[in-house]
Every structure is written in structure tokens, then in C-alpha cells.
Amino acid sequence: MRIDNRYLLHLADNNLILGQRLGEWCGHGPVLEQDIALTNIALDLIGQSRLLYQYAAEVQGGTHEDILAFLRVEHEYRNVLLVEHPNRNFADTVVRQYFYDVFNYLNYDALRQCTDEQLRAIAEKALKEVTYHRRWSSEWLIRLGDGTPESHVKVQAAVNHLWEYTGELFSPADFEIECHQTYHTPDVSTLQSAWRKHVKQTLDNATLQIPSDDVWMQSGGKSGRHSEHMGFLLTELQYMQRTYPAMQW
Amino acid sequence: MVAVSKDEIYKVLQEVTDPEIPVISVVELGIIRDVRIEENEHVVVYITPTYSGCPAMDVIPVLIRQAVIDAGYPDVTVHSTLSPAWTTDWITAEGRKKLKEFGIAPPDLQKSHSPAHVECPQCGSDETELISFFGSTPCKAAYRCKACLEPFDYFKCH
């Protein structure tokens, strides 16, 4: 039996959708270096998603990475809600990135222990890239939090606002539980304490408050129930493939 | 017709350069993992990607294929392998030298993600500072030299 395709698509979709969001910053970054940083991270994430879509296409058979990435409908995407959240201001983008980077690092790190050879290879490669992402977003979180009164207020507001989207990262879907049992892929619920520790430490360094754990957590992305933002994102993401089917660069 | 040899293919690959850094060959960059000559002179080149999203990784297999065909070996396949993951340690000594001559500081050999000293490839001073971890391509960070005041690229550790 081959690995459950829904799991591969979930991993791929997380990276593709966040990569697309970061790509929206292209040409709009606050300064040139950060414009380049945001799009470099986008490129890494989309590259990682390609490796996963290629593998998913091979497992599924009779399809292609572009079909999986660009021609599914909204409820077939299995990314978490956090990554589809709009960019809003730079503080929101940094906080979303930081929350995801810390998770992505822990998840790839644990994925290196799974019994699927191709996934292990992808995780090993991706982990090197995510190490740079996490450093970038950690440093910006500290710089904004411990920066001016205005940046402090904005970044704390972003932390508070995005907090309710973090619970879904650690709440496994049925396909994650199945893959964990069969292939020793990460049990995401066990990553939460390490994630929280890293987040607490960085927020402390940034002079920011960590929100209470006792809040309502949003969920639904993993089973295809997305926020109102997703349709707009997909419209842009899928435009070329829908207008010129099977086009190639 | 001369039988194709592995060495012969390596000589051909030595002439294939990175599209973004045209002074360094794919061999010196350390992305050639193996060359195999199979039945009926079928040449198989195994490469490994540098960064997952590096656009050069779509171009390099095409360049390799064309170079091998142009050298007179029409039956060639380029395979990409992910494991073991590419590391900047695989850049050869010659490759490091060429990077520096081209104006790109070669990666730190200690594999530090924040090396204490990055030598300016222009003037040789180690009074340099990081501008951004992310530079003009996925593999580079942006630095500035405090001695000659020139900005430069640093090939970051991976």
C-alpha cells in the first residue's frame, strides 16, 4: 500500500498556499532586502511543494504536479487556515510566518524519522531551508516587538489575532493519524509543547505577551473547509492554468 | 566509434556551467552525484538539487543533456536524486576559488549559519557585515564590506 495521498497533498498545500501569499509581497516589500527575503522564502516553499506534488502525482498515477497544484477546487485543498490568512500589514505577515516556520521546522525534523524513503529525503532537504526561514521570522518578531511603540502595538495585535489559527496545526486529521500509524510520520499533537516553548521564548525576547491557551481555536482547513479568503487566493493562483490549460513556462 | 567512458562524460560536464553563476561548473558545484554508462552506451547522469525552489534546477538538466548530446553521445538521461541532500561542502576547492574570483564569498567551511568572519572577495578585508540572509538567488546572502564599502554576495552554508 502506498502512502495516503491526502497526507502528501496536505503537506504540499500548506507550502504552496503560504508561498503564494508571500509572493503577493513581490515588489511591495517595506525595503528591497525584505522584499527579496519574502520572495526567497516563497520560492523555497513553492519548491518544497513541487517535490511533494510530484511525489503525490506519482503515488496517485494518471495526473501531473500542475494538475494537483492548480486545478483542484477549493474544498480539495487540505492546507491549514493559518497559511491562507491575508498578508495584511508587515507585522501580520511576520507573525504568520513565524508561527508556521516553527511548526514547519519541527514537522520536517520529525518527518525525517518516517519509514517512507521519498518523504524522508524531501524532509531532509527542506529542513535546511526552513532553518533560514525560522531565523528570519524570529529576528523580525523581536525587532518589531522590541522596536517602536507603534511596531510593538501592531505586532502584538497580529499575535493576538493569529493565535486562534495555531491550534489546527497540532490537531491531527484522520489521514495524519493513519499515516502516523503506518509510516511513522509525525504525530502533530506531540509537536505542540516544543512549538509553544520556542514561541514563548521568542515572544519574551520581543517583549510581547503570549496569548492564553484557553481560547477558541479555528479549524477546518485540513478537511477542506476554508476561510472566505481562500477563493480569492485560488482565483489568482489558478488563473494561468485555467485560462491556458496545460500551459508550461 | 570510441566507447563512451565515465571520464569522458565528466570532461563534458566540466564545461556545463551554472546558469546563474557562469564561472562555476556543475561538477565544481558538487551537484553531480554519479555518472553511469549502461547498456548500448546509454549515459545516465545523476544530479541533486541545491535548493528546492532554485529556478536553475529546471535549466541545468536541459544544459547537461544538450552538452552530452553535442559531445556525440545521443542517448542520455538526467536523473534528479534528493538524498543525500546537497551541501555546500561538496563545492570543490577549485569551485570555491572561482566563486571568490567572480566576486562571491565562498561558504564558511565550519558550516556556521552566522559565520564570524566573511572575507570581502573584493579587497580581502574581514571587516564585513550582513545586510540580509536572503540575496539575489536562494543560495546567497547579502553582505557589505566596511573597508572598501562595496556590497557583495556570500554563498551561504547549506
Image (tube, rainbow, N blue to C red):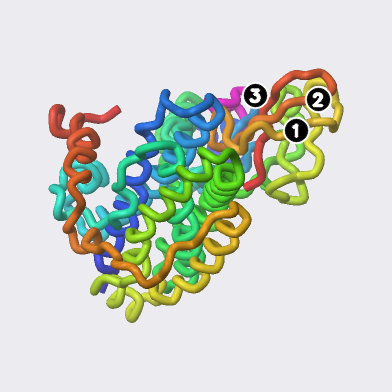
Magenta residue check for A127: no
Q: Which mark is residue B129?
A: 1
Q: Quadrant of residue A233?
A: top left
Residue at the image point whose x is 35% and y is 66% from the top: A167
**Subunit ID for the residue under disc 3:** B
Q: Which mark is residue A72?
A: none
Where does residue B35 sit, x and y in percent of width and height? 54, 46
Q: CA distance from mark 1 to mark 2?
A: 7 Å
Give the foreground label among 3 and 2: 2
At mark 3, the secondary structure is: loop
Return the chain for callout 2: B
Q: Earlier in the sequence, mark 1 or mark 2?
A: 1
Q: Are marks 1 and 2 in contact (CB under 8 Å)?
A: yes
- Helix, strand or loop under label 1: strand
Q: CA distance from mark 3 to mark 2?
A: 26 Å
Amino acid type, residue under disc 2 in the picture:
Lys
